Amino acid sequence: MHKWSFYNPTHVEFCPEGLDRIGNDVDYQRICLITTPGFTKRGIVARLERALGDKLAIVCDTVQPNPDIDAIDATVELLNPIAPDCLVGLGGGSSLDTAKALARILTQPEGTTLSGHFREGLPFEDERALPVITVPTTAGTGAEVTPFATVWDFRERKKHSLTGDDLFPVKAVLDPALTLFLPESLTVSSGLDAISHAFESIWNKNANPVSIGLATQSLAISLKTLPELKKNPHLLETRAAMMSASLLAGMAISQTRTALAHSISYPLTIRFGLPHGIACSFTLPELLKYNAEADDGRLERLALCLGYNDIPGLVEAVNNLLFRLDVLGFLAAHRLTEEQALVLVHEMFAPGRADNNLRPANVDDVHIIVRDALSAR
C-alpha cells in the first residue's frame, strides 16, 4: 500500500449543444474568448457571442498551433485594458493552453511576461489565476480538465509548462458535435495524444487506483474507437465516444503528469513540426515493452482488462493500431529519419518527465527506445 490522493475540481458538462447554453449559469461579466481564426470563419464564435451576450467583452481569435510565449505576451498587452474576470478557451489544446497561460499572467503585476519568467527566471507573484472555462473541439489533449498549460519558445527551441491548482478550469463544456468538422489528420493525431496520455498515466510512478481506472477505461474506448473514426468520421456517437476517452485520459494525466513518451516528443515537435500526438505515440509499443520489465502487475492487469492474454499481446495490438493509422506516413511527411531523431536523444531526455516513468531510464535507454521504434515502423 502507498499513500495517494485524487483532486480534480473541474465541473464537466458533456452534452450536445452545450455550447449554446454556456451562458445560462455563468456569473462572470467581462469574459474574454480565446480561440483561433477558424472558429470565427466557421460561425462557432458567433454562437458563443449569442450564448454569452453582453457578458462577452472581447474575442481574441489569434491563437496559432503550439502557442509561443512571445505571441501570448503580445495578447496580454491587448487584454490588460479589458480587465477580464474570466477566460473561455475554445478549440484544441493550443487554445485551451493559451487561455490558461493568459489566466496566469493577467493577474500578475503589469509588465509581467512569460518571456521574462522563462528566459530570465523572473518569478511570478503569488496571485491566483483568473477562472477559465474550456470548450474543447478536439478529442485528444484532455486540457479541459488538467491544471497544466504547455507553451513553447520557438526562438530558444524549448517547451515549458505552467501548472498549479488554480489552473484547473472551473468548468469544461464538452459538445462532441464540435469535433465533427475535424480533418482526418487532426482526428488521428489528437486521438493518439489521448491514447498516449492514458498509457503514460498507467506506467507512471504517480499513478493511483483512480487514475489507473480512468486510464484503463479510456483505452478500452479509444483503442477501438479511433480506427472506426478514421473509416467513418461523421458518426456523432463515435465522436462522442472518442471525446469521452480523451476526457478520461485527461483526468488521469491531471494526477500523474506525463512520462517518457512526452519527454521524447518535445524536440520532434519543435524542430520538425511533428504533430504532438504523433510525436508522443510512435514510441508507445517500445515503451510498453520497456516498462514491462519493471511491471508491478498493473500492466499485466491492463492487458487482461483490454482483452489480451498478456503484455506482448497488447504490444502487438498497439503496433497494429499505429500501422492502421499510418503513423509511418506522418513521420515521412515531416521528413523525420531515424538518423535525424537519434541526433536529438539528449534533448529527448527531460528529467521532469522521464523521472515519472515506472522503470527508471537514462539517455542510453531513450536512444534504444527511439531507434527500435523507428526501425520497427
Image: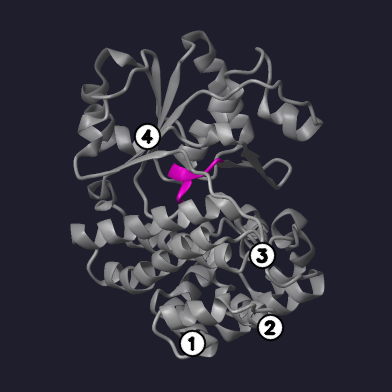
Residue 205 is situated, as x and y percent measured from the top left of the image, at: 67, 63
In the rendered image, the vertical position of residue 297 relative to residue 15, given as above or below = below
Mark 4 → mark 1, Cα distance in angstroms: 40 Å
Q: Is residue 258 left or right of residue 313?
A: right
Q: Which residues are magenta?
A: 142-147
On the image, numbered disc 4 is attached to which residue? Answer: 37
Mark with earlier residue (2, 4): 4
Which residue is labeled 1 in the image?
Answer: 316
Image point (74%, 61%), residue name? 355
* Residue 246 in view of the camera: yes
Mark 2 vs mark 4, CA separation in Å? 47 Å
Q: Nearer the viewer, residue 42 or 353?
A: 353
Q: Position of residue 231 (x, y in %)?
A: 26, 72
Label 3 vs label 2, nearer the camera: 2
Q: Earlier in the sequence, mark 3 or mark 1?
A: 3
Residue 235, numbered circle:
none
Q: CA distance from mark 3 to mark 4?
A: 33 Å
| Mark in the foreground, 4 or 1 | 1
Callout 2, which amino acid? Glu
Which badge, 3 or 4, is on the more N-terminal residue? 4
Mark 3 falls on what kind of element? helix
Image depth: mark 2 or mark 1 in front? 2
Q: What residue would you read off at disc 3?
A: 260
Q: Callout 2: few (<14), some (14-19), or many (20+) C-alpha neighbours within 10 Å? A: few
Q: Secondary structure at mark 4?
A: helix
Cβ atoms under marks 3 and 2 closer than 8 Å: no
Q: Residue at the location (63% across, 34% down)?
A: 69
Q: Position of residue 140 (x, y in %)?
A: 42, 55
Q: Amino acid at mark 3?
A: Leu
Residue placed under numbered mark 2 in the picture: 293
**In this picture, residue 299 sits left or right of residue 237:** right
Q: Amino acid at mark 4?
A: Pro
